[in-house]
Amino acid sequence: MAALGWLTPRRRSATARSVLAGEAAAEAARKSSLHAEQPAERSTDETTATTAEPEPAFPVVGDDRAAAFFDLDNTVMQGAAIFHFGRGLYKRKFFQRRELTRFAWQQAWFRLAGVEDPEHMQDARDSALSIVKGHRVSELMSIGEEIYDEYMADRIWPGTRALAQAHLDAGQKVWLVTAAPVETATIIARRLGLTGALGTVAESVDGVYTGRLVGEPLHGPAKAEAVRALAAAEGLDLARCAAYSDSHNDIPMLSLVGHPYAINPDTKLRKHARALDWRLRDYRTGRKAAKVGIPAAAGVGALAGGTAAAVALHRRRR
């Protein structure tokens, strides 16, 4: 990781931070997948996943230069991974009620406003990093396994899970790509039997979090940079790859590949996908689809505050 030359975000342009975050995520993903060659744990919803609509001509069986990249929140999983992880952290008393109130406000503001004010995001990120600073990576990894079982396992979309399985059955690698902490994303990928995960990477020294990120959260353009870096390292042909997301923020990632899919899309992504004739899938009920973007955080503020806390849970610095 030292070769990436970590610098504080304020001393780099947004583009440079995105590239740095993407490269760090790609490096972490490749290392975690190489060290995790073990029998995949079957998804709890695997029996229902077979009811999803089949893909008759795609993916192409045996095409080892193709892979699939899946956004996590509201694409693979109902809700946000860091929201569920934050619930677990709060339950385990990782932060106090006054911090909870602050994080709940930040999360609700972001969800309702739908814009990413740089100063607001910087404040939320700094708050989150301060919570896990000084904690051991191994401690948070162990907690992450427990939280997956408690809050996440039953929230996987069967339809999206079936799409991922189709790529695996075709002999292709499947990666999660998310702004969630790379450790959290890696746990979810392993539980679903996927290849690995690209996620936000935080600095740690001797297995302890320093309270700083490598680059920036893996969001928007940074996701595209991570996919591009991983594809180069893996020898993939992006024109033969697929990407799946619910959010217009992921249009840069979706635009990289030859087979983009809009899954449970927000309004902007749905419009964009239709204009470009991208494939769409919506696994929500009509009621849920109508409410997309209206936060669980606003209705369950006491739980939502924990989402910001988990942004800082990331990989051990090499």
Image (cartoon, rainbow, N blue to C red):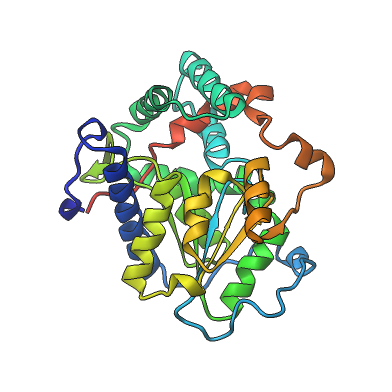
Instruction: Give the residue drawn at x 47%, y 52%.
Output: 252
Q: Is residue 44 visible?
A: no
Q: Residue furthest top?
A: 98
x then y, percent, for residue 244: 58, 58
Instruction: Give the residue drawn at x 46%, y 72%.
Output: 38
Q: Residue furthest bottom?
A: 62
Q: Residue furthest front?
A: 275
Of 266 and 209, nearer the camera is 266
x then y, percent, for residue 68: 52, 67
x then y, percent, for residue 216: 34, 40
Disc tally is 0
Q: Determine which quarter of the picture holds residue 127.
A: top left
Q: Give the quadrant of the C terminus.
A: bottom left
Q: Is residue 137 visible?
A: yes
x then y, percent, for residue 66: 49, 76
In this view, 158 is above or below 288: below
Of 255 and 250, nearer the camera is 255
In this view, 65 is above or below 98: below
Q: Determine which quarter of the picture holds residue 15.
A: top left
Of 258 and 102, nearer the camera is 258
